[in-house]
């Protein structure tokens, strides 16, 4: 069964690809799950993809809070060691998962071969923190359904490509099925995250910072600042994507990663 026990509890994951292929860890957005990465399966057919569901998300154990992004990074590192001991991993993360990916790379430089972090910034800013916390309180009080459409309107502004009908329906239904309090705890962990406290200098792996030009929370220059602080950091802007580029424009996402892997540019 696709669960692995780590120190904090049981983590669920989906795997795509043969285990003989190089491993890639996929860390989803707030409100996402392993389902979030299905659009990328064909683009990375030469890798073994592990869509890990963070504690409290999807089918992973609903561990009481409070906890931090650094705790989520410890979970991810323990998962990597349990799933593929002593191997090097490529690590992808988007939004909440992007901050976790950077923390994993800083804490475990020997096992991270490369990083692709999307929708990450040095400072979340008061506006974003307020939005995240207010939504957490609404969800705790009224359930996941209450915030589905407002959240998706923000994440998919006008001009943002939409995924196919079948995937969109499954994603929306899965989003609604999250445990409200677990979602709220993950939201609080994100709002409390201070990326400036992550030791970016400790990240030795080549790192691609991707950013959707239509993101509603932050500006491209805020993400580019992350890349500038890394020893081997690179930045790419995806013009036809918003806060969820792996879902909104998976072809451009994959092309940017492939170019980065090939020659260190995107």
Image: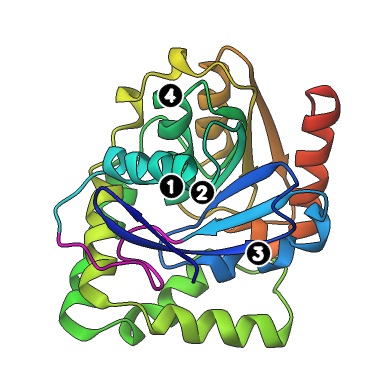
- Describe the colour scheme in one phrase: rainbow
Callout 3 crowding tier (Cα within 10 Å): few <14, some 14–19, many ≥20: many
Q: Earlier in the sequence, mark 4 or mark 3?
A: 4
Residue 90 position within the rendered picture, expressed as x and y whole percent measured from the top left: 63, 37
In front: mark 1 or mark 4? 1
Callout 4 crowding tier (Cα within 10 Å): few <14, some 14–19, many ≥20: many
Q: Which mark is residue 83?
A: 2
Q: Which residue carries the number 4 mark?
A: 106
Q: Main secondary structure of the magenta part?
A: loop
Q: Residue at x 65, y 22 (%)?
A: 206
Cβ atoms under marks 4 and 3 closer than 8 Å? no
| Element class at badge 1 | helix
Q: Earlier in the sequence, mark 2 or mark 4?
A: 2
In this picture, residue 138 sits left or right of residue 45: left
| Element class at badge 3 | helix
Q: Which residues are magenta?
A: 53-64
In front: mark 4 or mark 3? 4
Callout 2 crowding tier (Cα within 10 Å): few <14, some 14–19, many ≥20: some
In front: mark 2 or mark 3? 2
Q: Earlier in the sequence, mark 2 or mark 3?
A: 2
Residue 135 visible in this rendered orientation of the protein: no
Q: Which mark is residue 79?
A: 1
In front: mark 2 or mark 4? 2
Q: Which mark is residue 247?
A: 3
Cβ atoms under marks 2 and 3 closer than 8 Å? no
């Amino acid at each position: 069964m696709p669960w692995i026990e780590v120190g904090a509890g049981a983590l669920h994951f989906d795997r795509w690809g043969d285990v003989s292929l190089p491993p890639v860890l996929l860390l989803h957005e707030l409100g996402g799950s392993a389902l979030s990465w299905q659009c990328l399966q064909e683009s990375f057919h030469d890798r073994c993809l592990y869509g890990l569901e963070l504690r409290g998300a999807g089918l992973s154990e609903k561990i009481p809070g409070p906890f931090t992004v650094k705790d989520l990074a410890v979970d991810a590192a323990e998962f990597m060691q349990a799933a593929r001991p002593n191997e090097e991993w490529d690590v992808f993360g988007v939004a909440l998962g992007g901050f976790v990916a950077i923390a994993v790379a800083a804490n475990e430089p020997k096992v991270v071969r490369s990083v692709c972090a999307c929708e990450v910034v040095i400072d979340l800013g008061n506006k974003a923190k307020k939005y995240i916390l207010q939504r957490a309180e609404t969800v705790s009080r009224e359930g996941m359904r209450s915030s589905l459409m407002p959240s998706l309107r923000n994440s998919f502004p006008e001009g943002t490509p939409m995924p196919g009908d079948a995937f969109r329906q499954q994603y929306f239904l899965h989003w609604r099925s999250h445990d409200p309090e677990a979602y709220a705890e993950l939201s609080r962990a994100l709002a409390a995250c201070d990326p400036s406290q992550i030791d970016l200098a400790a990240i030795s792996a080549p790192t691609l910072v991707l950013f959707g030009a239509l993101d509603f929370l932050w500006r491209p220059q805020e993400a580019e600042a992350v890349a500038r602080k890394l020893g081997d950091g690179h930045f790419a802007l995806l013009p036809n994507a918003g806060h969820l580029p792996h879902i909104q424009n998976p072809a451009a996402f994959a092309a940017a990663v492939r170019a980065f892997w090939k020659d260190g540019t995107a």
